[in-house]
Amino acid sequence: MADSHTTYLSLGSNLENRVYYLQKALFLLQEKAGSIKAISPVYESASYGFEADDFLNICVILETSLAPEELLTLALKIESSLGRTRSAEAGYQARTLDIDILYYNSLILNSDSLQLPHPELHKRRFVLRPLADIAPQLYHPVLKKDSRNLLQESKDKIIPRKIAIKLYKNWQELFAALNFVAIEGNIGAGKTTLAHKISEDFSAKLVLERFADNPFLPKFYEDPSRYAFPLEMSFMADRYQQFTEDTSQFDLFKNFMVSDYDVYKSLIFAKITLQPDEYLLYRKVFTLMYRELRKPNLYLYLYQTTDRLLENIKKRGRTYEQQIEPDYLEKINRGYFDYIKSFPEQKTLIMDVSELDFVDHPADYTLVLDDILKFTTQLQNPT
């Protein structure tokens, strides 16, 4: 088994969605470099040595089996993968991501590509402040002082400001913080498939709609006007019961919950299928029930074109769905968008997955996750 080494890294970003770049870098370090043991609070400070937008900075403790030069190579690859372009021009520049190795154990190293400890760390408050939070007694092997003393003696006049942003070591922690994710979409959009994948990959309690057991559904597709009201009432009652039971408590061995529907879909479908007087009665009952139900902290809507939806419906082969008309699917899409527009304060991510296959193509699944990450970090990104 390879030896493990304790390293201390500084990460910074001052372009675009700064929180995203820091968070993505942490995920990549955890995946490729070793195990992140601690993440400092996030600090914001003016750019150091040049005029540019403010930086967000953190420090992390990383246990790794990589040699110093290997860790440096990986850090540069991560920077490049997240849009960092290094220029031959002299001086500091704005950047999507900067990763510096501060310490590697207590190693003192001077090579053409890497110096350890980092030769500038004692001059920069944006490094020393977060470093002192996670390693206050970390001893500088050359200067013979710990992080707190170096911070106290720093002559840097740029004072970092701690800000209320939370970063996570991995996807499991991020999803656990979201607590409850609802994945919605039209018939055949892929919501159940995505909910299954996220549940399996990140240890979530899976809440699935029990549509297959509804005795009115096949009858509705045969005779909509006759069976619309009993269908929608039975759906509402079943969803209410299920949500009350499934979301009232967590599975002790799961990190969060993911559902392939949100109960509000009952009202969306009812408005399409019911007569006006039936809908008014239905809405009164629904409103009373919906108040008591748990709401998702992330509402993900998967959009697919009508043609793609029809292809998916045909592929999965449910007999009672084969007669669904394009106009019905388009009405459902409009209903969802009207609902989403009516709740602007809700954390809603609309994702066009018409050209994606997140079942057979891992890269497409990665794109979906990355869009979720960009969205959740953008909610935290200070302006």
Image (cartoon, rainbow, N blue to C red):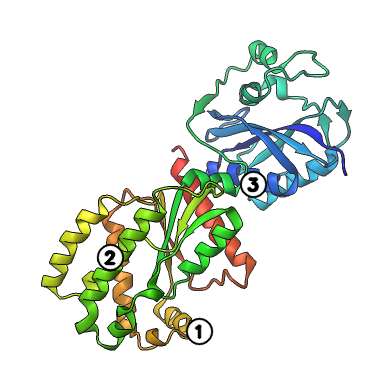
Type of amino acid at the residue the image marks with label 1 = Lys
Image vertical order of residue 380 relative to residue 244, above or below: above
337 vs 368, left or right, is: left
What residue type is disc 2 on?
Answer: Met
Q: Is disc 1 placed on a helix, strand or loop? A: helix
Q: Residue at x 40, y 52 (%)?
A: 247
In the displayed structure image, the side of residue 145 where residue 182 appears, left or right: left
Looking at the picture, does residue 291 appear above or below residue 315? above
| Residue labelled with disc 1 | 315
Q: Residues within 10 Å of mark 1 (few under 14, many from 20)?
A: few
**Residue 165 rendering spot, x and y as whole percentages:** 50, 35
Earlier-in-chain disc, 2 versus 1: 2
Q: Secondary structure at mark 3?
A: helix
Residue 45 lies left or right of residue 267; in this view the side is right
Place of residue 6 in the rendered image (x, y in percent of width and height, measured from the top left): 78, 32
Circles 2, 1 touching at the beta carbon (< 8 Å): no
Mark 3 or 1: the one toward you? 1
**Foreground label between 2 and 1:** 2
- Amino acid type, mark 3: Phe
Residue ID for mark 3: 27
Q: Which image quarter: residue 188?
A: bottom left
Tell me the residue at 39%/49% (across/down): 248
Crowd class of label 3 (few under 14; some 14 to 19; many from 20; radius 10 Å): some
**Foreground: disc 3 or disc 2:** 2
Pick whichever of labels 3 and 2 is earlier in the sequence: 3
Q: CA distance from mark 3 to mark 2?
A: 39 Å
Question: Dot 2 corresponds to which residue?
Answer: 236
Q: Residues within 10 Å of mark 2 (few under 14, many from 20)?
A: many
